[in-house]
Image (cartoon, rainbow, N blue to C red):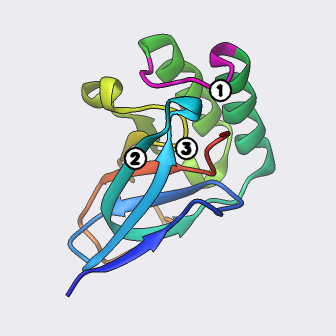
Amino acid sequence: MTIRINLDCLNQLAIILEWSSGIVYETQTAGIACRDGRAEGVLIPIAGHTLEEDILQYIYKKYNEHCWDLDVADADHIDFAFQKNYDTKYFTVNRDKLKESREAWIHITIQYPSDYKWPLFKGVSANQAILTWKNSD
């Protein structure tokens, strides 16, 4: 049995850690382009008002509510924002999935060092995730 959860009312940044959980998260993405995002995994809220401001202001200023493909410059900017936040400093935008990344749905890779003491999650070998938030539309 698969459980489906709609994230259209999500009020903060979160990641969907892609993992076989039986829970599928769904949301509208890509601004006014209204594309669907859907992934199975575990939802983990991400704290950090500055991180949210850095990423969302950049996306909305550059794309004006219709971001459906990210480019390398976008990935670099988002990676820089991740580096400034303690909880996300080991997150990077997945360059292999840039064409699948868009507003409110960015594919990321998480690579904690083996000796890192305070990861957001433990006990899961998955390192692929999706950064998500409430779509602007």
Q: Is residue 113 visible?
A: no
Q: Amino acid at mark 1?
A: Glu
Looking at the image, is mark 3 or mark 1 nearer the viewer? 1
Q: Secondary structure at mark 1?
A: loop
* Residue appearing at x 45%, y 21% in the figure: 70
Locate residue 2 relative to residue 45 in the image: left or right.
Answer: left
Q: Label 2: how many residues lie within 10 Å, few (<14), some (14-19) or many (20+)?
A: few
Looking at the image, is mark 2 or mark 3 nearer the viewer? 2
Locate residue 99 relative to residue 25 in the image: left or right.
Answer: left
The answer to which of marks 3 and 1 sits earlier in the sequence is 1
Q: Which residue does the numbered mark 3 point to in the structure image?
A: 89
The answer to which of marks 2 and 3 sits earlier in the sequence is 2
**64 within the magenta span:** yes
Q: Amino acid at mark 3?
A: Lys
Q: Which residue does the numbered mark 1 point to in the structure image?
A: 65
Q: Is residue 24 visible?
A: yes
Q: Secondary structure at mark 2?
A: strand
The answer to whether marks 3 and 1 mark residues whose Cβ atoms lie closer than 8 Å is: no
Q: Amino acid at mark 2?
A: Asp
For marks 2 and 3, give the CA distance: 28 Å
Q: Which residue does the numbered mark 2 point to in the structure image?
A: 36
The answer to whether marks 1 and 2 mark residues whose Cβ atoms lie closer than 8 Å is: no
Identify whether 33 is placed above or below 77: below
